[in-house]
Image (cartoon, grey):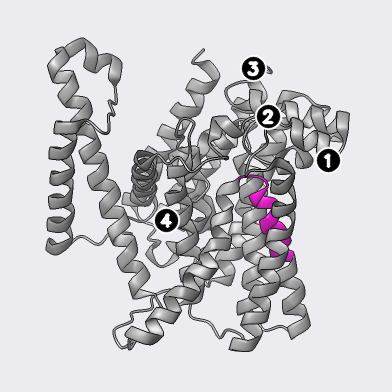
Amino acid sequence: MKHFNPRDASLIVFGLSLGVILLMIITQTHSLLYDEYNFVPNIHLLIQYGLTNKFLLSMTGSPGPTYAIIHYLCLPFTHFSVQGIRLTNFVLLLLTLYVVYLNAGLLKARDPLMIALNFIAVTMVWVSCGLALTEVPAMLCFVISLYALLQGFIVEHKFITRILLVILAGLFLSFAVLGRTFFLMAILAIPAYVVIRFLLSKFDSGINSETTLFSFNLPSAKQSVIMLIVFLLFSLYLPIKIFMIWHSLAPPQDTGLVGANNLSLVPWYGVLAFCYCGLATLILAPDWFIINKRMLIISTVIAFVFLIINLLQGYFLFAPFMTAAKRFLSLSSFNIYQKTIPAFIFLFAFNFLLSSLVRLWQNRYNPVFMFIALTALLIAFSSIKVKAQFSSRYVGQIVPLFLLLFIPFEKTSWVKVIRISVGVCLGFISLYFYYFGG
């Protein structure tokens, strides 16, 4: 008789989690909530104007047309009901998990199913999965693009087949970019890695490289260059064409709101993004963190300097449990509190980033790892360009990349069952309050 094991428990947690999200979608309010107000009307605009310049110029919200087009194609099934659109989003979530499963299989994961289902353990993704928002369609397009790209580079195919695969990868990446412009960072990750490899060829012998992930026989250098050029051309054509219509990276209705027409930066949002990345890593693969005396000393000293400067100047203010803190703390104590908390956030974010840079160095000669890792870190870093309020959903978009990066660190254990249970409980609470928080 088979013993009940941590994998079985994990599957139950993930199955119940998906069932809870589906149940909430089916049973709760049919009116628009939260950011759905910004995105669902674009489907009606597409019905009214078609895929024309007028539609593109009339769109609301910062994302592009991918979301509206996908849901427009599903109208025969959803009949423009909010519940139907949310259910479509849930189906897109299941498809995303399936493509992550395929990607994990390509990358030789021992348990691709568990890798894919880990997605739902991350607290930040629940709101995107349970409401009719834009992140899931963009993530689906991106993981399809990544699958086609990996097929082209790491699976034995004839050269013409490789070219067709990278064309497909480029097209789906362009759809992802037009779903959420954060995925432009996947395009930037390629020249970034080219520069890194050039510098390594000049200054690094590679003797100390400790490649731990994804070892494959890749195409020749000539074929790889041709494939990358084709990939970049097909990735950029549609976005550039639409950005030229908008004269910015977002529809003109919200260009000023999101800061798409200027160079304004919010560094604190970058700190928050890396902090949330660290929280996701703590749930999925805490062994990603490199904890040793040197790392702790470096991160603690830098965080202490940050704390002193922030106490004196008050550049960054952050107060979790604000209502309770204001009730129990005096005005001067609350002022210190909201200047102190950012130092702890910075400490955690910096430790995640430092650990990630070490992992990059260990795998610096592995192009597959470097592309995925650079894309994830660049998406997190690009949060500094967000002008409107920061949202943890921005980090949620990176989770499919984290799932693949953390494959060697996947350890199904009872401790992990506890971690994912905490993650899904917090995710449920966050989604619950969007439905019932008023």
Residue span colored magenta = 168-180
Identify residue type, mark 1.
Leu
Q: Earlier in the sequence, mark 4 or mark 2?
A: 4
Q: Earlier in the sequence, mark 1 or mark 3?
A: 3
In the rendered image, which residue does mark 3 sit on? 29
Residue 287 visible in the snapshot:
no
Percent position of residue 376, x then y = 47, 56
Dominant secondary structure of the residues highlighted in magenta in the image: helix
Identify residue type, mark 3.
Thr
Percent position of residue 252, x then y = 67, 34
Gap in Å between the C-alphas at discs 1 and 3?
24 Å
The image quarter containing residue 294 is bottom left
Gap in Å between the C-alphas at discs 4 and 2?
53 Å
Q: Which mark is residue 60?
A: 2
Image point 33% across, 64% down: which residue?
357
Q: Are marks 1 and 4 in contact (CB under 8 Å)?
A: no
Q: Helix, strand, or loop for circle 1?
A: helix
Q: In the picture provided, is 207 more to the left or to the right than 251?
A: left
Q: Which mark is residue 3?
A: 4
Q: Which mark is residue 293?
A: none
